[in-house]
Amino acid sequence: MYTVRIKLKAHVAEYLQGKFGTGTPVLVRLPNSSDLFFVLLDLLSKRPESCPVDRGNCEILIPDREYGKHPVVYNYISDNAQEVFSAHAECVMWADIHQYMEEQKHVKGINYLQSAYFIVESLKIKSISTDAIIKNHFRWRKRCRRTWTSRKKVSMKMG
């Protein structure tokens, strides 16, 4: 079993550990159907000779596949690759949170505050507050949804 340690933002590392954790404090096993799994596979490279020991706040199991990159040889992620993985992991985290909150609100009738509390409690996220999650969600909603007046202005310009 080979692992790689990656430096992530604290809330992203806690999300990955809460969502894909294996029971040990920092070890994460990504499911082979997730986007993060394939991003990790693409970013793995051969370990350089003068490479320092991996450091980071999140330890991820390197997938051992029947074909492709073998973890004995490809078990290194460069600093640039860590930034790419971190950005992708944060994007996946927020997409998952937004989808969950919208589903809870519109399908089950649970308000956003209760959904945010449930996310924080179930995933054991300590580095980000429920208020920050709600504020991020409302900023995302404002970017994604157009108001009735902006639709009216756009349709008036078109016709």
Image (cartoon, rainbow, N blue to C red):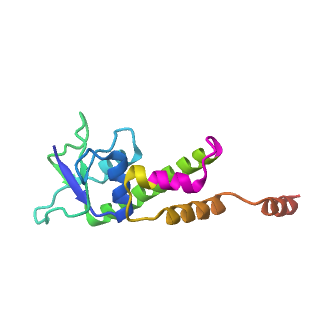
Task: Tell whether 157 sits left or right of 99.
Answer: right
Q: Within the magenta stretch, is there residue 111?
A: yes
Q: Residue at x 34, y 39 (%)?
A: 32
Q: Quadrant of residue 83?
A: bottom left
User: Which image quarter: residue 10?
Assistant: bottom left
Q: Residue at x 63, y 41 (%)?
A: 107
Is residue 39 visible in the rendered image? The answer is: no
**In the picture, residue 5 is in which quadrant?**
bottom left
Residue in the foreground of this view, choosing between 90 and 155: 90
At x 78% / y 63%, what residue is drawn?
150
Residue at image point 26% right, 62% down: 57
Q: How many marks?
A: 0
Q: Is residue 140 left or right of residue 70?
A: right
Nearest to the observer: residue 127 or residue 42: 127
Which quadrant holds the N terminus? top left
Q: What x and y, as percent, mark residue 36?
A: 37, 49
Query: Residue 49: percent from the left, percent from the top?
Result: 10, 62
Magenta segment, principal secondary structure? helix
Task: Quadrant for the C terminus, please.
Answer: bottom right
The residues colored magenta run 106-119
Nearest the eye: 23 or 16: 23
Residue 66 appears in the rendering: yes
Taking the view exactly as shown, the residue that stands out farthest to the left is: 49
Is 18 situated above or below 57?
A: above
Q: Position of residue 26 (x, y in %)?
A: 25, 54
Q: Residue 37 in the image: x percent, y percent?
A: 34, 45
Asked if residue 123 is among those painted magenta in the image, a careful observer would answer no
